[in-house]
Image (spheres, grey):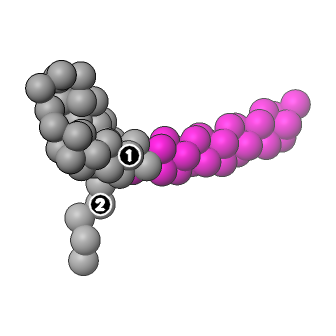
């Protein structure tokens, strides 16, 4: 079973790839590889944030339903 990605880990790798891309001495080929890596980590972060947003929406809905019952 694949290890579930963790936001902080993916974000840290995204930041590292972005920082490396700023280095002017990086070759074009390495820049492309770094861009691909950054894009992968961005996608992972985006997916984790989307999942968290959905979970929060469910919690908000549950909270609203409880408030309605209390009235």
In x, y percent, where is residue 67? 78, 33
Q: Secondary structure at mark 2?
A: loop
Q: Is residue 7 left or right of residue 60?
A: left
- Name the residue at the bottom extreme: 1
Q: Quadrant of residue 70?
A: top right
Which sits in the foreground, 7 or 30? 30
Q: Residue at x 17, y 23 (%)?
A: 23
- Which part of the image, by quadrant, shows the C terminus? top right
Q: Residue at x 32, y 50 (%)?
A: 36
Q: Quadrant of residue 38?
A: top left
Q: Residue at x 24, y 77 (%)?
A: 1
Q: Nearer the viewer, mark 1 or mark 2?
A: 1
Residue 48 belongs to the span the image colors magenta: yes
Residue position marked by numbered label 1 in the rendering: 39
Which sits in the foreground, 29 or 13? 29
Residue 4 is tagged as: 2
Q: Is residue 59 left or right of residue 69?
A: left
Q: Residue at x 58, y 41 (%)?
A: 53
Q: Name the magenta segment's main secondary structure.
A: helix
Instruction: Check whether the beta carbons of the residues at disc 1 and disc 2 lie within 8 A of each other.
Output: no
Q: Residues within 10 Å of mark 2 (few under 14, many from 20)?
A: few
Residue 39's place in the image compared with 19, above or below, is: below
Residue 62 belongs to the span the image colors magenta: yes
Q: Secondary structure at mark 1?
A: helix
Q: Is residue 37 left or right of residue 39?
A: left
Residue 5's place in the image compared with 46, above or below, is: below
Q: Residues within 10 Å of mark 1 (few under 14, many from 20)?
A: some
- Name the residue at the left extreme: 25
The image shows a total of numbered marks equal to 2
Q: Quadrant of residue 35?
A: top left
Which sits in the foreground, 2 or 38? 38
Q: What segment carries the magenta color?
A: 44-71
């Amino acid at each position: 079973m694949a290890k579930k990605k963790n936001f902080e880990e993916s974000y840290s790798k995204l930041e590292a790839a972005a920082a490396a891309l700023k280095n002017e001495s990086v070759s074009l080929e390495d820049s492309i590889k770094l861009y691909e890596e950054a894009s992968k980590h961005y996608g992972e972060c985006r997916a984790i944030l989307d999942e968290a947003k959905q979970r929060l929406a469910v919690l908000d809905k549950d909270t609203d339903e409880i408030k309605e019952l209390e009235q």
